[in-house]
Amino acid sequence: MAVFCGLGLTLGGMAIAGEGPAVFKLENRKGTVTFNHHAHQALGLKCGACHHGVEGGKKVPYKAGQKNQKCETCHNKGNTSMPAKYRKPMSVFHKTCKGCHKKMAANHPKAPTKCNGCHKK
């Protein structure tokens, strides 16, 4: 059974490529990061690998039907309900994206792990 998962469909908890935005751009001073959402879905990543919510003050993986919001909605300097290290979207992206890329390097050698691999001016 497939259920809508905000940015992708899930089947047995795995994202199906082709749902949600194909590619989106994250603009920043270090250079634009062009994120290929469909390519990451095609790897079989679960939606909860990137998307999450908060229940009872704790981070919980994505649940079907959850409204997806921009990361900055919660991850911002003014949100004192979370530790300071999670208030900067950049810190969260680096931990999540760069951390995953480093773990996957052996199987996916094209996954960038250096700044200029993702940030393009």
Image (cartoon, grey):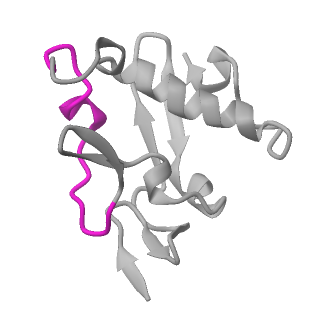
Left or right for 74, reference 61: left
- 119 sits left or right of 59 in the view: right
Q: What residue is at 51 percent from the left and 51 percent from the top?
A: 37
User: Residue 27's spot in the image, x, y percent?
Assistant: 39, 24
Number of dots carrying numbers: 0
39 is higher (above) or lower (below) than 97: below
Position above or below: 12 against 89:
below
Task: Name the magenta segment's main secondary structure.
Answer: loop
Q: Which of 86 and 121 is in front in this view?
A: 86
* Quadrant housing the N terminus: bottom left
In the rendered view, tell whether residue 41 sits above or below residue 100.
below
How far across and how far down the image is residue 95, in percent?
Answer: 52, 26
The answer to whether residue 9 is above or below residue 113 is below
Of residues 43 and 81, the one drawn nearer to the viewer in this rendering = 81
Between residue 106 and residue 22, name the one nearer to us.
106
**Is 68 within the magenta?**
yes
Which span of residues is magenta-colored?
Answer: 63-79
Residue at the far bottom in the pictured view = 1
Residue sitting at 42 percent across and 10 percent down? 29
Please name the residue shown 80% across and 44% down the image. 108
Q: Is residue 32 magenta?
A: no
Q: Judge from the rendering whether residue 18 lies leftward or rightward of residue 80; answer left or right.
A: right
Residue 47: quadrant of the picture = bottom left
Residue 101 place in picture, x, y as percent: 68, 35
Q: In the depicted view, which residue is nearer to us: 109 or 84? A: 84
Across and down, in percent, residue 121 comes to 54, 16
